[in-house]
Amino acid sequence: MSAQRSMAVAALLMVCGIIIGALASHALQSSLSATQLHALDTAVQYQLLNALGLFLIGLLAQSRVDAWLPRIALVLAVGIVCFSGGIYVMMLAGVPRILGLITPVGGVLMILAWAMLAWRLLTTSDGASRRL
């Protein structure tokens, strides 16, 4: 995923997170249980925080040549969609909980993306990666 695309996807994830958060705290408050609202709140928080991180990875990719950054961005984006999307689908669409198994996969992908980024930042010296 290119730096520009990472930032665009991050911005779209932020828009969706804000919309779903607003819906959950206003329009859906009377029709969902406290447990469902809490689950939606968790999904929104993770989506917004990780989308901001995805945006920052895009910025980093603009200033640093590293073949791993686009891969890390892709893993993080897929993780966000699987984790938060899985919760949204379970809470809002009422799909069977078995389909919610995608949620932990998303969580693992987000963890993996952040671990990969830490690994790249710790093992790549400034001299090894060219500055643009």
Image (tube, helix red, strand yellow):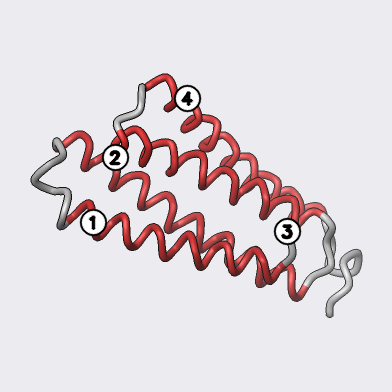
Which residue is labeled 1 in the image? Answer: 23
Identify the element where label 2 is drawn.
helix
Q: Earlier in the sequence, mark 4 or mark 3?
A: 3
Q: Earlier in the sequence, mark 3 or mark 1?
A: 3
Identify the element where label 3 is drawn.
loop
Q: Are marks 4 and 1 in contact (CB under 8 Å)?
A: no
Q: Looking at this rendering, what residue extends furthest in the bottom direction?
A: 132
Disc 2 marks a residue whose amino acid type is Leu
Left or right: 24 as drawn, with respect to 18 = left
Q: Nearer the viewer, mark 2 or mark 3?
A: 2
Q: Earlier in the sequence, mark 2 or mark 1?
A: 1
Q: How crowded is the residue under tag 4: few (<14 C-alpha within 10 Å), some, or many (20+)?
A: few
Which residue is labeled 2 in the image? Answer: 92
Q: Nearer the viewer, mark 2 or mark 4?
A: 2
Q: Nearer the viewer, residue 119 or 102?
A: 102
Left or right: 128 as drawn, with respect to 38 = right
Q: Are marks 3 and 1 in contact (CB under 8 Å)?
A: no
Q: Position of residue 77 (x, y in %)?
A: 59, 51
Q: Position of residue 116 (x, y in %)?
A: 70, 46
Q: Position of residue 73 (x, y in %)?
A: 67, 55
Q: How crowded is the residue under tag 2: few (<14 C-alpha within 10 Å), some, or many (20+)?
A: some
For the residues labelled 2 and 3, the Cα–Cα distance comes to 30 Å
Disc 4 marks a residue whose amino acid type is Leu
Identify the element where label 1 is drawn.
helix
For the residues labelled 4 and 3, the Cα–Cα distance comes to 26 Å
Q: How crowded is the residue under tag 3: few (<14 C-alpha within 10 Å), some, or many (20+)?
A: some
Residue 61 placement: quadrant: bottom right
Q: Earlier in the sequence, mark 2 or mark 3?
A: 3
Which residue is labeled 4 in the image? Answer: 101
The circle drawn on residue 1 is: 3
